[in-house]
Amino acid sequence: MATVPDPRAAARPDIMGRDFAPDPAGLDIRWCGDITYFPTDQGWLYLATVINIAPAVLSAG
């Protein structure tokens, strides 16, 4: 299953220009995140991740 965008929603600008390459000079400037979910015996498990692109460190919460 994939996210399906609302065709009526306004387009958002791509302020990063799809450039996800690490930039050591840009610490704490460029972040990337995602949310997903998994079915379990007790219901849905939701997982949110945020990555600081410069050092490529993963934070999950």
Image (cartoon, rainbow, N blue to C red):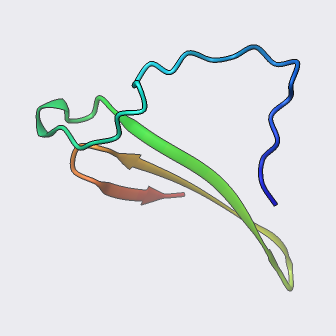
Residue lying farthest left? Answer: 25
- Of the pair 12 and 58, the residue shown nearer to us: 12
In the image, what residue occupies the spot 33% across and 33% down?
30
Q: Residue at x 86, y 80 (%)?
A: 42
How many marks the image carries: the answer is 0
- The x, y position of residue 55, in whole percent, is 21, 50
Q: Residue 43 occupies which quadrant of the picture?
A: bottom right
Quadrant of the rendering where the N terminus is positioned = bottom right
Towards the viewer: 45 or 24: 24
Q: Is residue 57 left or right of residue 24?
A: right
* Residue drawn at (40%, 25%) of the image: 16
At which x and y percent is residue 2?
Answer: 77, 54
Left or right: 32 as drawn, with respect to 27: right
Q: From the top left corner, tell me how far across and down residue 31 is, in percent.
A: 39, 38
Residue 59 horizontal side relative to residue 9, left or right: left
Residue under the point 29% across and 29% down: 29
The C terminus lies in which quarter of the figure?
bottom right
Q: Is residue 40 above or below residue 38?
A: below
Q: Is residue 12 above or below residue 28?
A: above
* 35 lies above or below 18: below
From the viewer's side, name the closer residue of 6 and 25. Answer: 6
The residue lying furthest to the bottom in this view is 41
- Quadrant of res 32: top left
Q: Is residue 39 left or right of 17 when viewed as pictured?
A: right
